[in-house]
Amino acid sequence: LRDYELAFPLGGRSRGSVPLFSMDPATLEVPLRASVMDAVVHALLRLIMGTKEAACYSFHSFRIGLACALLAAGYSHADIQAHCRWKTDASIQIYARQNAEMFGARVLAASRRTVSSTVVANFLRQGVDIDGDATVVALDGIAGLNLGQ
């Protein structure tokens, strides 16, 4: 990508209106369409992994992979959106997925925390009188808030 940009440099604001890749790099007039990129990616993948496995991937798969890798590396949504060349943050919500290791680490970290909060709806289902003096005393003892004084 660096070599491409150096060979066909753009100045100022023109990067925002010119396609990143072009079928004619000399004029930059014909954008390289996703269908062409898909065909190139499939041809390469068939050579590398065979037809059956290659059918599971597309050029879009690599954009998703990049978004997931950037998320795992701790990049901001704005950075991911810029790198993947998405127009809105909505694409990040769909495609930038947590990998299993990140998800597992967060669940493990959560499991090591002491949780003393609960949802009031759970109290009501269990028949606890959350407005009663006994509840205030119990909460006071748990949290040390001195609510009953």
Image: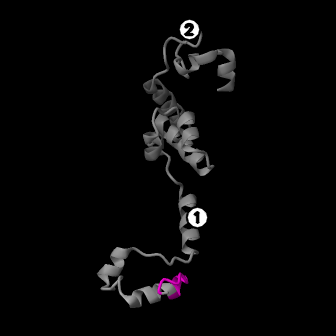
Secondary structure type for disc 2: loop
Residue at (54, 21) in percent of width and height:
16
Which is nearer the N-term, disc 1 or disc 2?
A: 2
* Helix, strand or loop for disc 1: helix
Q: Residues within 10 Å of mark 2 (few under 14, many from 20)?
A: few
The answer to whether 28 is drawn above or below residue 101 in the figure is above
Height in image: 116 above or below 6? below
Rendering coords of residue 18 (x, y %): 53, 17
Above or below residue 73? Residue 28 is above
Q: Which mark is residue 128?
A: none
Residue at horizontal 55 percent and vertical 78 percent from the top: 114
Residue 109 on image: x %, y %: 58, 69
Q: Amino acid at mark 2?
A: Thr
Query: Is 25 in the magenta?
Result: no
Start-end of magenta stretch = 141-148
Give the residue displayed 43% in from the left and 45% down from the top: 94
Q: Quadrant of residue 99?
A: bottom right
Residue 55 in sight in this render: no
Asked if one can make out residue 16 in the rendered structure from this viewpoint, the answer is yes
Q: Which residue is mark 2?
A: 27
Location of mark 1 (residue)? 105
Image location of residue 66, percent across then percent down: 56, 41
Q: Residue at 48% across / 43% down in the picture?
A: 92
Most distant residue in the front direction? 149
**Secondary structure predominantly adopted by residues drawn in magenta:** loop
Q: Position of residue 87 (x, y in %)?
A: 46, 32
Closer to the camera in the image, 124 or 108 = 124
